[in-house]
Amino acid sequence: MTNDEFQRLLRQMGEELYRDMPWRQDTRPYYVLVSELMLQQTQVDRVVPKFEAFIKRFPNERALAAAPLADVLVQWQGLGYNRRAKFLHEAAKKIVELGEFPQDEVGLVALPGVGKNTAGAILAYAYNQPAIFIETNVRAVYIHHFFADSDTVDDKDIRKLLEDTIDHKHPREFYWSLMDYGVYLKKQGIKPARSKHYVKQSPLKGSVREVRGQIIAILTEGETTVAMLVARYDGDTRFELALSGLVADGLVIIDDDMVYLTK
């Protein structure tokens, strides 16, 4: 398939498979940042209602930065990976401190929780810039069309094709099409060559992450004591790692015997 043929196909699939989302209706940088952090390891269907509730509570970076972390964690409940909420909270504070939302990769990757791919997504979606970034749906589309006979594919090879085929006039719509088409391919059960960078998400059930989420959920209802938590998780070897990890991540505070969310 030539680059021109691929671009035409992608435009067609983008029109046919377009998914309406609140951060596509309004592409302000803050909305894109919130959505990108929420979408890490979380499906769109779960994110949409959480995003809408989050934006209602924290409509802009100033509102988010001014809120206690405990309030942010309450709004984040149900999304998992609570460190993302802390990163988002810290990023909002950084943006307010700067006085404006960063508009280039250097400024964006300086924000907590924002790596090069997230920065590229913000540049494309919020600023309509032809930034190059790779995520699972981008990989799915390029591997399916250009590496069907390969066993494994390196991101550097996908990046070269992405640079050759990106729509420089309409990068925002280009990436929307990639996302929607990638999801479609997966739903069709199409399994192309495996990306060398693919990392399967570990199961939640039975993990330390599961207990971390449970402790956060308990604390969103109010503070408790170490003794009460110990009694609740009596014999569960995951508890100590979960609680100490939450403290180390700055999400939970232990003061004497009391345990509560970081204010």
Image: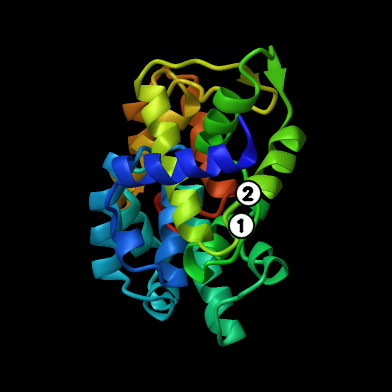
Q: Residue at x 41, y 25 (%)?
A: 185
Task: Tell me if 6 is positioned left or right of 51 in this view.
Answer: right
Asked if the residue at tag 1 contacts the one at tag 2, i.e. Cβ–Cβ closer than 8 Å, the answer is yes
Q: Which residue is mark 1?
A: 120
Count of number-bearing discs: 2
Viewer-closest of 260 and 126: 126
| Above-or-below relation of 258 to 81 | below
Viewer-closest of 120 and 231: 120
The part of the image, by quadrant, that contains residue 61 is bottom left
The residue most toward the bottom is: 99
- Label 1 element class: helix
Q: Amino acid at mark 1?
A: Gly
Task: Tell me if 53 is positioned left or right of 188 in this view.
Answer: left
Mark 2 burial class by Cα count in 10 Å: few <14, some 14-19, many 20+: many
The x and y percentages for residue 130 are: 61, 61
Viewer-closest of 163 and 78: 163
Q: Earlier in the sequence, mark 2 or mark 1?
A: 1
Residue 228 has which mark?
Answer: none
Q: Quadrant of the N terminus?
A: top right
| Above-or-below relation of 69 to 155 | below
The x and y percentages for residue 56 are: 24, 68
Viewer-closest of 35 and 179: 179
Q: Amino acid at mark 2?
A: Phe
- Label 2 element class: loop
The part of the image, by quadrant, that contains residue 155 is top right
Mark 1 burial class by Cα count in 10 Å: few <14, some 14-19, many 20+: many
Q: Residue at x 25, y 59 (%)?
A: 52
The x and y percentages for residue 64 are: 40, 72
Residue 133 has which mark?
Answer: 2
User: How far is mark 2 from mark 1, CA to CA?
Assistant: 5 Å
- Say if residue 111 shows up in the picture: yes
The x and y percentages for residue 162 are: 65, 44
